[in-house]
Image: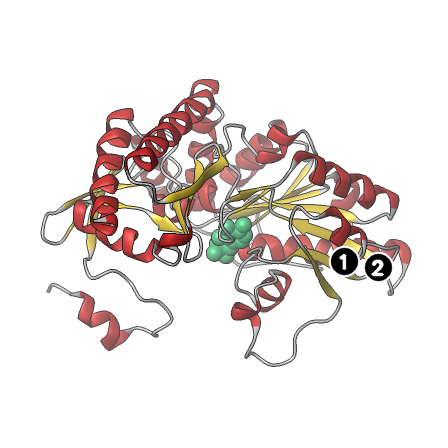
Amino acid sequence: MSFTRADFDQYMVPNYSPAAFVPVRGEGSRVWDQAGREYIDFGGGIAVNSLGHCHPALVKALHEQGSKLWHLSNVFTNEPALALAKKLVDNTFAERVFFCNSGAEANEAALKLARRAAIERFGEQKNKVLAAYNSFHGRTFFTVCVGGQTKYSDGFGPKPEGIFHFDYNDLDSFKALIDDDTACVIIEPIQGEGGVTPADKAFLQAIRDLCDKHNAFLIFDEVQSGNGRSGQLFAYQHYGVTPDILSTAKGLGGGFPIGAMLTTENLAKHLAVGTHGTTYGGNPLACAVAGAVMDVITDPAVLSGVAAKAELVRSKLTEIGQRYPIFKEVRGLGLLIGAELNDQYKGRARDVLNLSVEEGAMILMAGPDVLRFAPSLVMPDADIVEGLARVERAIARVVG
Ligand SMILES: *Cc1c(COP(=O)(O)O)cnc(C)c1O
């Protein structure tokens, strides 16, 4: 039996509006649909397929673990989870790890830990959560309210209290909010969904210093920027500013759902037995695949390859911009790259995306004015060149 896009409207809740074609197979940075049409993938499942589609090392890990042990619950621990936790601890500031299944859950855990630790140490009044406008931290009700985009959080009834927003990269607006009742600050080192905007190093450092001054915990949301995408394992290592808590997901599983919250031993003790949990978190199958992802992306050759590939994407986009004056700016960090359309083409990112599909390339948007590229960290250079030639043909049609 073969299904079509029309079946989506027949059977699915209408919260998404998927493309007209239905992908059925992927390999590396290429995807094929039901009709056998091939696409070059710069979206990577929204920065998830960090090693492309069906990477042999991930397929192997999935098959091996798949015939051994799938799920136990957290009544027991398991070897793949312990191995993955050790890899994350060995390669970051963290001393303790909590596993969950998504980015929103990693942030939910991070925010609950920060508030609980602040309240236990300093009292009930220390519960303020500061976050940036236009940030994205997930779709659970707590995380979506923290995210600071009311278009996602309005219309669901009363919101959790104690959440305040500052302007990204605007230190005065941040200083106006932080005080001794602040439990934590959560921030993306590079805003992904909000438009691919990297933080200024001085801004992140000043936030770190003010958090220390006010005994507030600093949470970096590295759901999108983490797992090699910046060219370092995590973007905080690129900035040289270390958080107290780090959340990640997306690229960690390379396409298998998993999230993680990383923190210090000193903070972790506030999540004592029974304070938080999840049925699937730390599932052996997910952890085995993520362990294989970590093995590949901690290879220094892969990380330095990210910088080289990012340079190739950016220089090709700059060339396209010279031939078709459509971009205001090409920006980003590592292989998280945004091309903002200039005023004449404002709001047309969706058109470029749709025409790119017709030309055989998958790209992403970050709002209506920004094209977003978040490809596989090991995308072959030839695919980058060919894929961007297809994007250029789409842009020529938008301009022409
Ligand atoms: C995608 C994303 C999330 C949410 O992750 P889910 O797995 O969709 O819950 C949170 N924070 C950032 C920065 C993201 O990019």
Amino acid residing under circle 2: Ile
Give the residue drawn at x 60%, y 28%: 91
Q: Which mark is residue 115?
A: 1
Total numbered circles? 2
Q: Where is residue 144 in the image (x, y as percent from the top left)?
A: 57, 64
In the rendered view of the protein, which quadrant contains the N terminus?
bottom left
Amino acid residing under circle 1: Arg
Q: Residue 102 carries which label?
A: none
Q: Where is residue 88 in the image (x, y as percent from the top left)?
A: 58, 33
Give the residue drawn at x 85%, y 57%: 120
**Residue on which disc 2 sits:** 119
Give the residue drawn at x 20%, y 46%: 25
Q: Position of residue 359 (x, y in %)?
A: 17, 46
Q: In which quarter of the image is residue 113?
A: bottom right
In the image, residue 124 above or below residue 206? below
Q: Are marks 1 and 2 in contact (CB under 8 Å)?
A: yes
In the image, residue 3 above or below residue 55? below
Q: Nearer the viewer, residue 38 or 109?
A: 38
In the image, residue 271 above or below residue 94? below
Q: Quadrant of residue 348?
A: bottom left
Q: Nearer the viewer, residue 62 or 45?
A: 45
Looking at the image, can residue 262 be seen?
yes
